[in-house]
Image (cartoon, helix red, strand yellow):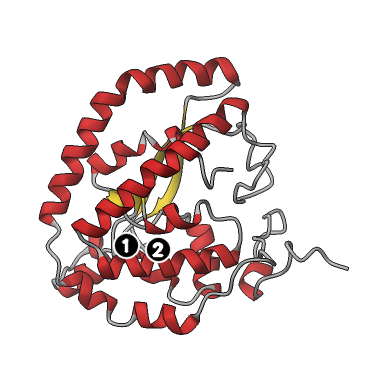
Amino acid sequence: MPDPTQVSLSPALQAAPARVVRLPIAPDAPPVSDDETAALAEDLEGVVDARSRTLRRVADVLVAASALAVLAPVMGIVAVAIKLDSPGPVFYTQDRIGINRRRSERRRGARGADARRRVIHAGRPFKIWKFRTMRTDAEAAGPQWAKNGDPRITRLGRLLRKTRLDEVPQFLNVVHGDMTLIGPRPERAFFINILENEVPHYRKRLLVKPGITGMAQVHSGYDDSIDSVRTKVRWDLRYIRSQGARADLAILVRTVRTILTGDGAC
């Protein structure tokens, strides 16, 4: 009898290179209502377009720059610890997909090569920065999600992931403008191309900048299956629709609680 956590997902995934690890479906995950997700996704573009992004951008830069200054000594200690713990670089960079700016470019009537990117992505590609928590050969067999007890994670990496210290370098992404403090987590193009065929309204997450933390992260932790992604998309769309100071404050409080308890870490 086949393992229910390792099944084929769709023709899109079946056509992927054979070396790629398949995305699991969690057999015990609670069902996600497609009707609720559809209701949250309805006219979401109009909700996002009606907001001013200037104040949020100012707050992002101020908080991220302050966090980098305050946490600089901690980052130095972590960097030394990583070098002592396992061979490899201190930082880990990975291509992720951010906000879909083509829609706003079309709305403004943008022209030229910049508005017609030769390589079509669901959103704007950027390099995300993290402290390295895995072996350097972690994806020798192809892209895959981390899982509980993942043997690829280093000894120090488990502590960094549990405390979320591995995410601290992403304040650099916030200062650069690729990310915001609170929003949907950015994903790789490889997984987006699969997930948007498996999860209704998945691409709606790209209406806003990706965040270091978010409503989906504090409620659902790391992605580990297609079913967990469906649940997180619902949380992401709920946040995008209700985005504001009150929602952000509630998420920050839950983020602190998650860091202190280590909930959801692999």
Tags 1 and 2 touching, CB below 8 Å: yes
Q: Name which residue type carries label 2.
A: His
Residue assigned mark 1: 117
Q: Quadrant of the N terminus?
A: bottom right
Quadrant hosting residue 123: bottom left
Kindly identify the residue that appears in the image at 48 percent across and 77 percent down: 200
Kindly identify the residue that appears in the image at 20 percent across and 31 percent down: 66
Give the x, y percent position of residue 116.
28, 66
Q: Name which residue type carries label 1.
A: Arg
Secondary structure at badge 1 equals loop
Question: Seen in the image, is 55 located left or right of residue 191?
Answer: left
Taking the view exactly as shown, the residue that stands out farthest to the right is 1
Give the x, y percent position of residue 74.
37, 21
Question: Seen in the image, is 21 located left or right of residue 35?
Answer: right
Give the x, y percent position of residue 22.
68, 60
Label drawn at residue 60: none
Residue assigned mark 2: 121
Q: How many numbered marks, from 0 up?
A: 2
- Graded by Cα atoms within 10 Å as few (under 14), some (14 to 19) or many (20 or more), the crowding at tag 1 reads few
Q: Quadrant of the C terminus?
A: top right
